[in-house]
Amino acid sequence: MRLPSVSVSSAQPFNRSAGLFPGYALALHLHRFLENTLAPAYAKRTLGISAWSQIIVGGSNFGELLGALSVFLLSDHVTTPVSQCGIYCNRLGDSDAPFLDSLAPP
């Protein structure tokens, strides 16, 4: 009786999205840690009023909302953020990045 041979190429390839969950989880926890530790410390030590940390955190959350809304609304028009980076580099006068000129939208 012959056993079926298994070739290496028939094995399942590594799932490229395997790092998405740990990456998002780490980013979320670090972001919340920074909001819950740095904002109150900054408000108390620098501004002198610790209650203003809620305003800082609220502004951060509002900025996240605006960013998510812009991604949601512009996802059909802007397919990659690389072209936007090229435009911003050129606007800032960064002449050391001529390769980004080819990435700008027509």
Image: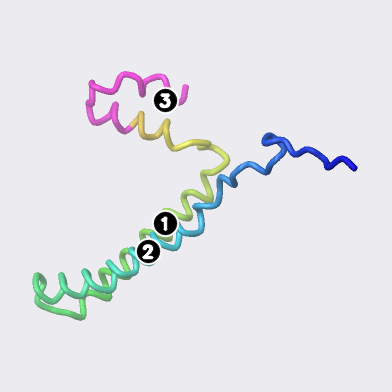
In front of the other: 15 or 83: 15
- Residue 105, given in percent of the width and then of the height, sits at 46, 25
Is 94 part of what is drawn in magenta?
A: yes
Res 104 label: 3
Mark 3 or mark 1, earlier in chain: 1
User: What is the number of the mark on residue 66?
Assistant: 1
Image side of residue 62 versus residue 80, left or right: left
Query: With respect to residue 103, does 12 lie above or below?
Result: below
* Amino acid found under the numbered disc labelled 2: Phe
Q: Are marks 2 and 1 in contact (CB under 8 Å)?
A: yes
6 relative to 34 in the view: left or right: right
Cα separation between marks 2 and 3: 29 Å
Which residue appears at 22% of the width and 26% of the height? 93
Is 33 above or below relative to 13? below
The extreme front residue here reads 1
Q: Name the residue under label 2.
A: 62
SS of the residue under disc 1: helix
Where residue 47 appears, x then y in whole percent?
A: 11, 72
Give the amino acid type for the residue marked by disc 1 in the picture. Leu
* Residue 89 on the magenta segment: yes
Residue segment shown in magenta: 88-106
Residue at 87 percent across and 40 percent down: it is 2
**Which quarter of the image is occupied by the N terminus?**
top right
